[in-house]
Image: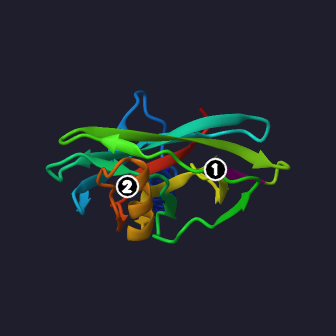
């Protein structure tokens, strides 16, 4: 029986493209980190689990992302959350985000001692909207609820953007009895991750 060479070539190309476009599930858990960025004495790193299973349209799942902050300033510093989370597709385009607020709360400052690292964890929820599209949502430290959609299997990246004004830093410094409070603007480098089919 003869096998058509053209058919084999086309089949091989399809398999290669499929494997490139749809990430496969791993047999272990791995954490991906961004390269560090230091601004005004604090070093920022985004961290995320390497693979997130895409839930079915009747399921919900909780995923965690982290912001690692290391004090390189030479003295104690207070940091006031929050920061905005950024998601990008494999082609570099931003995953559209929207938001709403049911209430407002004031985040508590976090004191980071010299040389210490603070890990801020953000719990996100993944689920489907009326069986039509899958999205991620989380509520930040001020009570603002962020939503990112649509999501499908593929390659993504995560980063954080933080903007703390000198005016706000001065206000919190007075509340903390004169302790230095970080101010500045920073966007972390990107940490890659995959959304995969199934669990």
Q: Label 2: which residue?
A: 173
Main SS of residues in magenta: strand
Mark 1 surroundings within 10 Å by alpha-carbon count, few (fewer than 14), some (14 through 19), many (20 or more): few
What segment carries the magenta color?
Answer: 133-137
Picture quadrant of residue 119: top left
How far apart marks 1 and 2 lie (CA) works out to 18 Å
**Helix or strand or loop: what does disc 2 sit on?**
helix
Is residue 4 shown to the viewer in this render? Answer: no
Residue at 68 percent of width and 54 percent of height: 104
Residue at 47 percent of width and 63 percent of height: 90
Furthest residue to the top? 27
Residue 69 is left or right of residue 83, and the answer is left
Looking at this view, is 55 or 168 the one in front?
168
**Helix or strand or loop: what does disc 1 sit on?**
loop
Classify the position of the C terminus by image quarter: top right
Looking at this view, is 191 or 5 the one in front?
191
Q: Label 1: which residue?
A: 105
Residue at 14 percent of width and 50 percent of height: 74
Q: Position of residue 40 (x, y in %)?
A: 24, 63
Q: Position of residue 86 (x, y in %)?
A: 50, 61
């Amino acid at each position: 029986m003869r096998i058509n060479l053209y058919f084999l070539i086309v089949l091989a190309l399809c398999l290669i493209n499929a494997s490139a476009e749809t990430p496969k599930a791993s047999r272990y858990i791995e954490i991906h980190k961004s390269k560090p960025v230091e601004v005004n004495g604090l070093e920022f790193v985004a961290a995320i689990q390497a693979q997130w299973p895409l839930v079915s349209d009747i399921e919900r799942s909780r995923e965690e992302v982290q912001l690692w902050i290391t004090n390189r300033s030479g003295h104690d510093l207070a940091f006031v959350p929050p920061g905005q989370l950024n998601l990008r597709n494999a082609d570099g385009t931003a995953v559209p985000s929207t938001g709403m607020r049911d209430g407002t709360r004031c985040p508590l400052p976090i004191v980071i001692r010299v040389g210490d690292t603070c890990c801020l964890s953000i719990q996100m929820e993944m689920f489907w909207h009326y069986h039509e599209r899958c999205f991620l949502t989380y509520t930040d430290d001020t009570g603002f609820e962020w939503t990112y959609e649509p999501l499908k299997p593929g390659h993504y990246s995560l980063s954080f953007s933080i903007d703390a004004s000198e005016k706000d830093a001065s206000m919190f410094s007075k509340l903390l009895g004169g302790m230095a409070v970080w101010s500045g603007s920073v966007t972390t480098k990107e940490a890659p991750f995959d959304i995969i089919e199934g669990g």
